[in-house]
Image: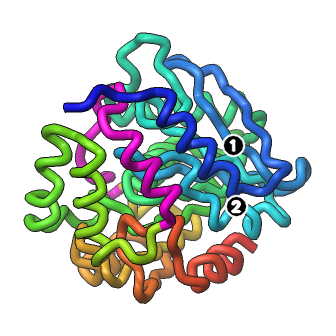
Amino acid sequence: MRAYDSAAFREAYDRVMAKWPADREAVTVPTPFGPTHVNVHGPRDGDPLVLLPGGGGATSASWYAQAAQLGRERRVYAVDLIGAAGLSGTDGGPGPRTVADLVVWLDAVLDGLGVREVSLGGHSYGAWIALHHAAHHVAQDSPRTPRRVRRLFLLDPTRCFAGYRTAYLLHALPMLLRPTPRRVRAFLEWETGGGAALDPDWLRLQEAAAGFPSAKPVTGPRPAPQALRALDVPVLLLVAANSRTHDTYEVTARAEEALRHVVTAVLPDVSHHALPQAAPPELGRRLREFLS
């Protein structure tokens, strides 16, 4: 297996970040698990919006197609997940090991950014983290403690309401066991139906992330049903019509059963791994309407 090339990864990361608005800022936030890299855009007095990427080779750079529009009125904070591909680091430590650790990490990021109440969203694994974080804080809310998450959007979330398809896991297995650029590309092209909609720079970043020295990702159960029923914040669930990751309509049906204040929609002509960078216009429109 070819050794991981940190210089090639950083070059690919910077090439995708060049697609962000020119006034984008980069900040580093200290947390108990190591420094966290955050890309920031939008008016300083805008309502804060925190975006979490998917797992694997996804990074905050993947939000480039949405950053300009979302940042017109909001202060956008796109986070590189701790211990995963990106510019966040664990300082040689183990990184988060449990869901509770992820909650502590994300709270530390929000505190370091100086934001108390946020709109929070995530794609795939990032959506799983966002949902767990919001559900955790349901039990913490009180008249003296303002709600931390004001609005929540979940973009084709994994392991939140339904499991993976068997075919998806079988296709992903070679890449997971021995990640190489060629295997990453083959998997993404399979899941996206040929990869025609994938940005070449974004795809090179996914390939460059193969073998990234990341910590073992935190896995765990879906959020508890009682916590989801107690979640009283508005939730927007957007799923990919062509996703090979899970059954799109099973995800929406179970979410509507589990959440009291959820609006669901299916995004046409897009797959799981094409989000959020190769997204139909409907994605941006629905996000803007929901957040406003």
Decide: few, some or many residues near mark 2? Use Cα within 10 Å; few <14, some 14-19, many ≥20: many
Q: Amino acid at mark 2?
A: Ala
Residue 30 sits above or below residue 281 on the image? above
* SS category of the residue bearing label 1: strand
Viewer-nearest residue: 142 or 70: 70
Q: Quadrant of residue 250?
A: bottom left
Q: Residue at x 31, y 60 (%)?
A: 158
Majority secondary structure of magenta residues: loop
In 3D space, how far apart are the residues under numbered discs 2 and 1 (Cα atoms)? 10 Å
Question: Where does the C terminus fall, quadrant-wise?
Answer: bottom right
Q: Assess whether residue 131 is covered by the magenta stretch.
A: no
* Residue 33 shows up from this direction: yes
Q: Amino acid at mark 1?
A: Asn
Q: Position of residue 94 (x, y in %)?
A: 35, 16
Badge number at residue 39: 1
The residue identified by callout 2 is 67
